[in-house]
């Protein structure tokens, strides 16, 4: 992976990030790559929050992966800080290349650097390949997640 750069996303990366978010059956139903306005507004909010880390994996000048890491101070677990990994996406022609592993390893290392005692993520129940991937990296399916659309 020596040809891979993991760096903070820039506003110029938004089209590539949104394209990856939309490039699967679930994302195709909820993302709109034809209108980047809401993504740009969200990116500006994220960019000004020191606990938000939108990262991209870049190979040969092309954005080929992304994830968002959120650091959350808390009271539970004796005042533990935790992190949440969201929106992990790998470009279709890079899947299986080790890029996903590199991004998650970056998130784990950064979470440790930030003093987190726990890193967590959710994955849609239909993403069985992703579940195997996260379990291979040491994550356990220890909780049941609930969501409420607003």
Image: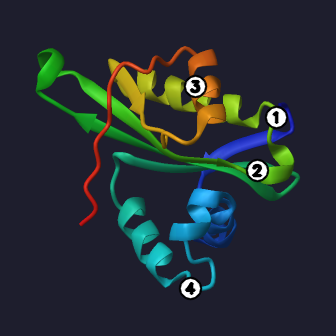
Q: Which of marks 3 and 1 is nearer the N terminus?
A: 1
Question: Mark 4 highlights which residue?
Answer: 35
Question: Mark 3 highlights which residue?
Answer: 134
As displayed, is residue 74 above or below residue 64? above
Between 80 and 123, which is closer to the camera in this rendering? 123
Front label number (2 vs 3) = 3
As displayed, is residue 81 above or below residue 47? above
Asked if marks 1 and 4 touch (Cβ < 8 Å), the reply is no
Q: Distance between the residues labelled 1 and 4?
A: 30 Å
Question: Picture quarter containing residue 3?
Answer: top right
Q: Which of marks 1 and 2 is nearer the N terminus?
A: 2
Mark 4 Cα shell of 10 Å, populated few (<14), some (14-19), many (≥20): few
Q: Distance between the residues labelled 3 and 4?
A: 31 Å
Q: Earlier in the sequence, mark 2 or mark 3?
A: 2
- In this picture, residue 17 sits left or right of residue 119: right
Q: Earlier in the sequence, mark 2 or mark 4?
A: 4
Question: Mark 1 highlights which residue?
Answer: 96
Question: Picture quarter containing residue 81?
Answer: top left
Q: Distance between the residues labelled 2 and 3?
A: 22 Å
Question: Mark 2 highlights which residue?
Answer: 58
Between 87 and 122, which is closer to the camera in this rendering? 122
Tag 3 secondary structure: helix
Mark 2 Cα shell of 10 Å, populated few (<14), some (14-19), many (≥20): some
């Amino acid at each position: 992976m020596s040809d891979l750069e993991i760096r903070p996303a820039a506003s110029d990366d938004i089209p590539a990030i949104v394209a990856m978010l939309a490039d699967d059956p679930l994302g195709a139903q909820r993302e709109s790559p034809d209108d980047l306005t809401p993504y740009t507004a969200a990116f500006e909010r994220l960019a000004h929050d020191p606990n938000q880390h939108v990262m991209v994996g870049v190979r040969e000048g092309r954005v080929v992966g992304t994830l968002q890491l959120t650091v959350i101070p808390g009271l539970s677990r004796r005042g533990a800080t935790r992190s949440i990994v969201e929106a992990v996406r790998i470009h279709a022609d890079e899947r299986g290349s080790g890029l996903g592993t590199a991004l998650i390893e970056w998130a784990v290392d950064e979470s440790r650097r930030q003093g987190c005692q726990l890193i967590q993520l959710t994955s849609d129940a239909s993403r069985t390949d992703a579940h195997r991937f996260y379990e291979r990296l040491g994550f356990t399916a220890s909780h049941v997640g609930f969501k409420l659309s607003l």
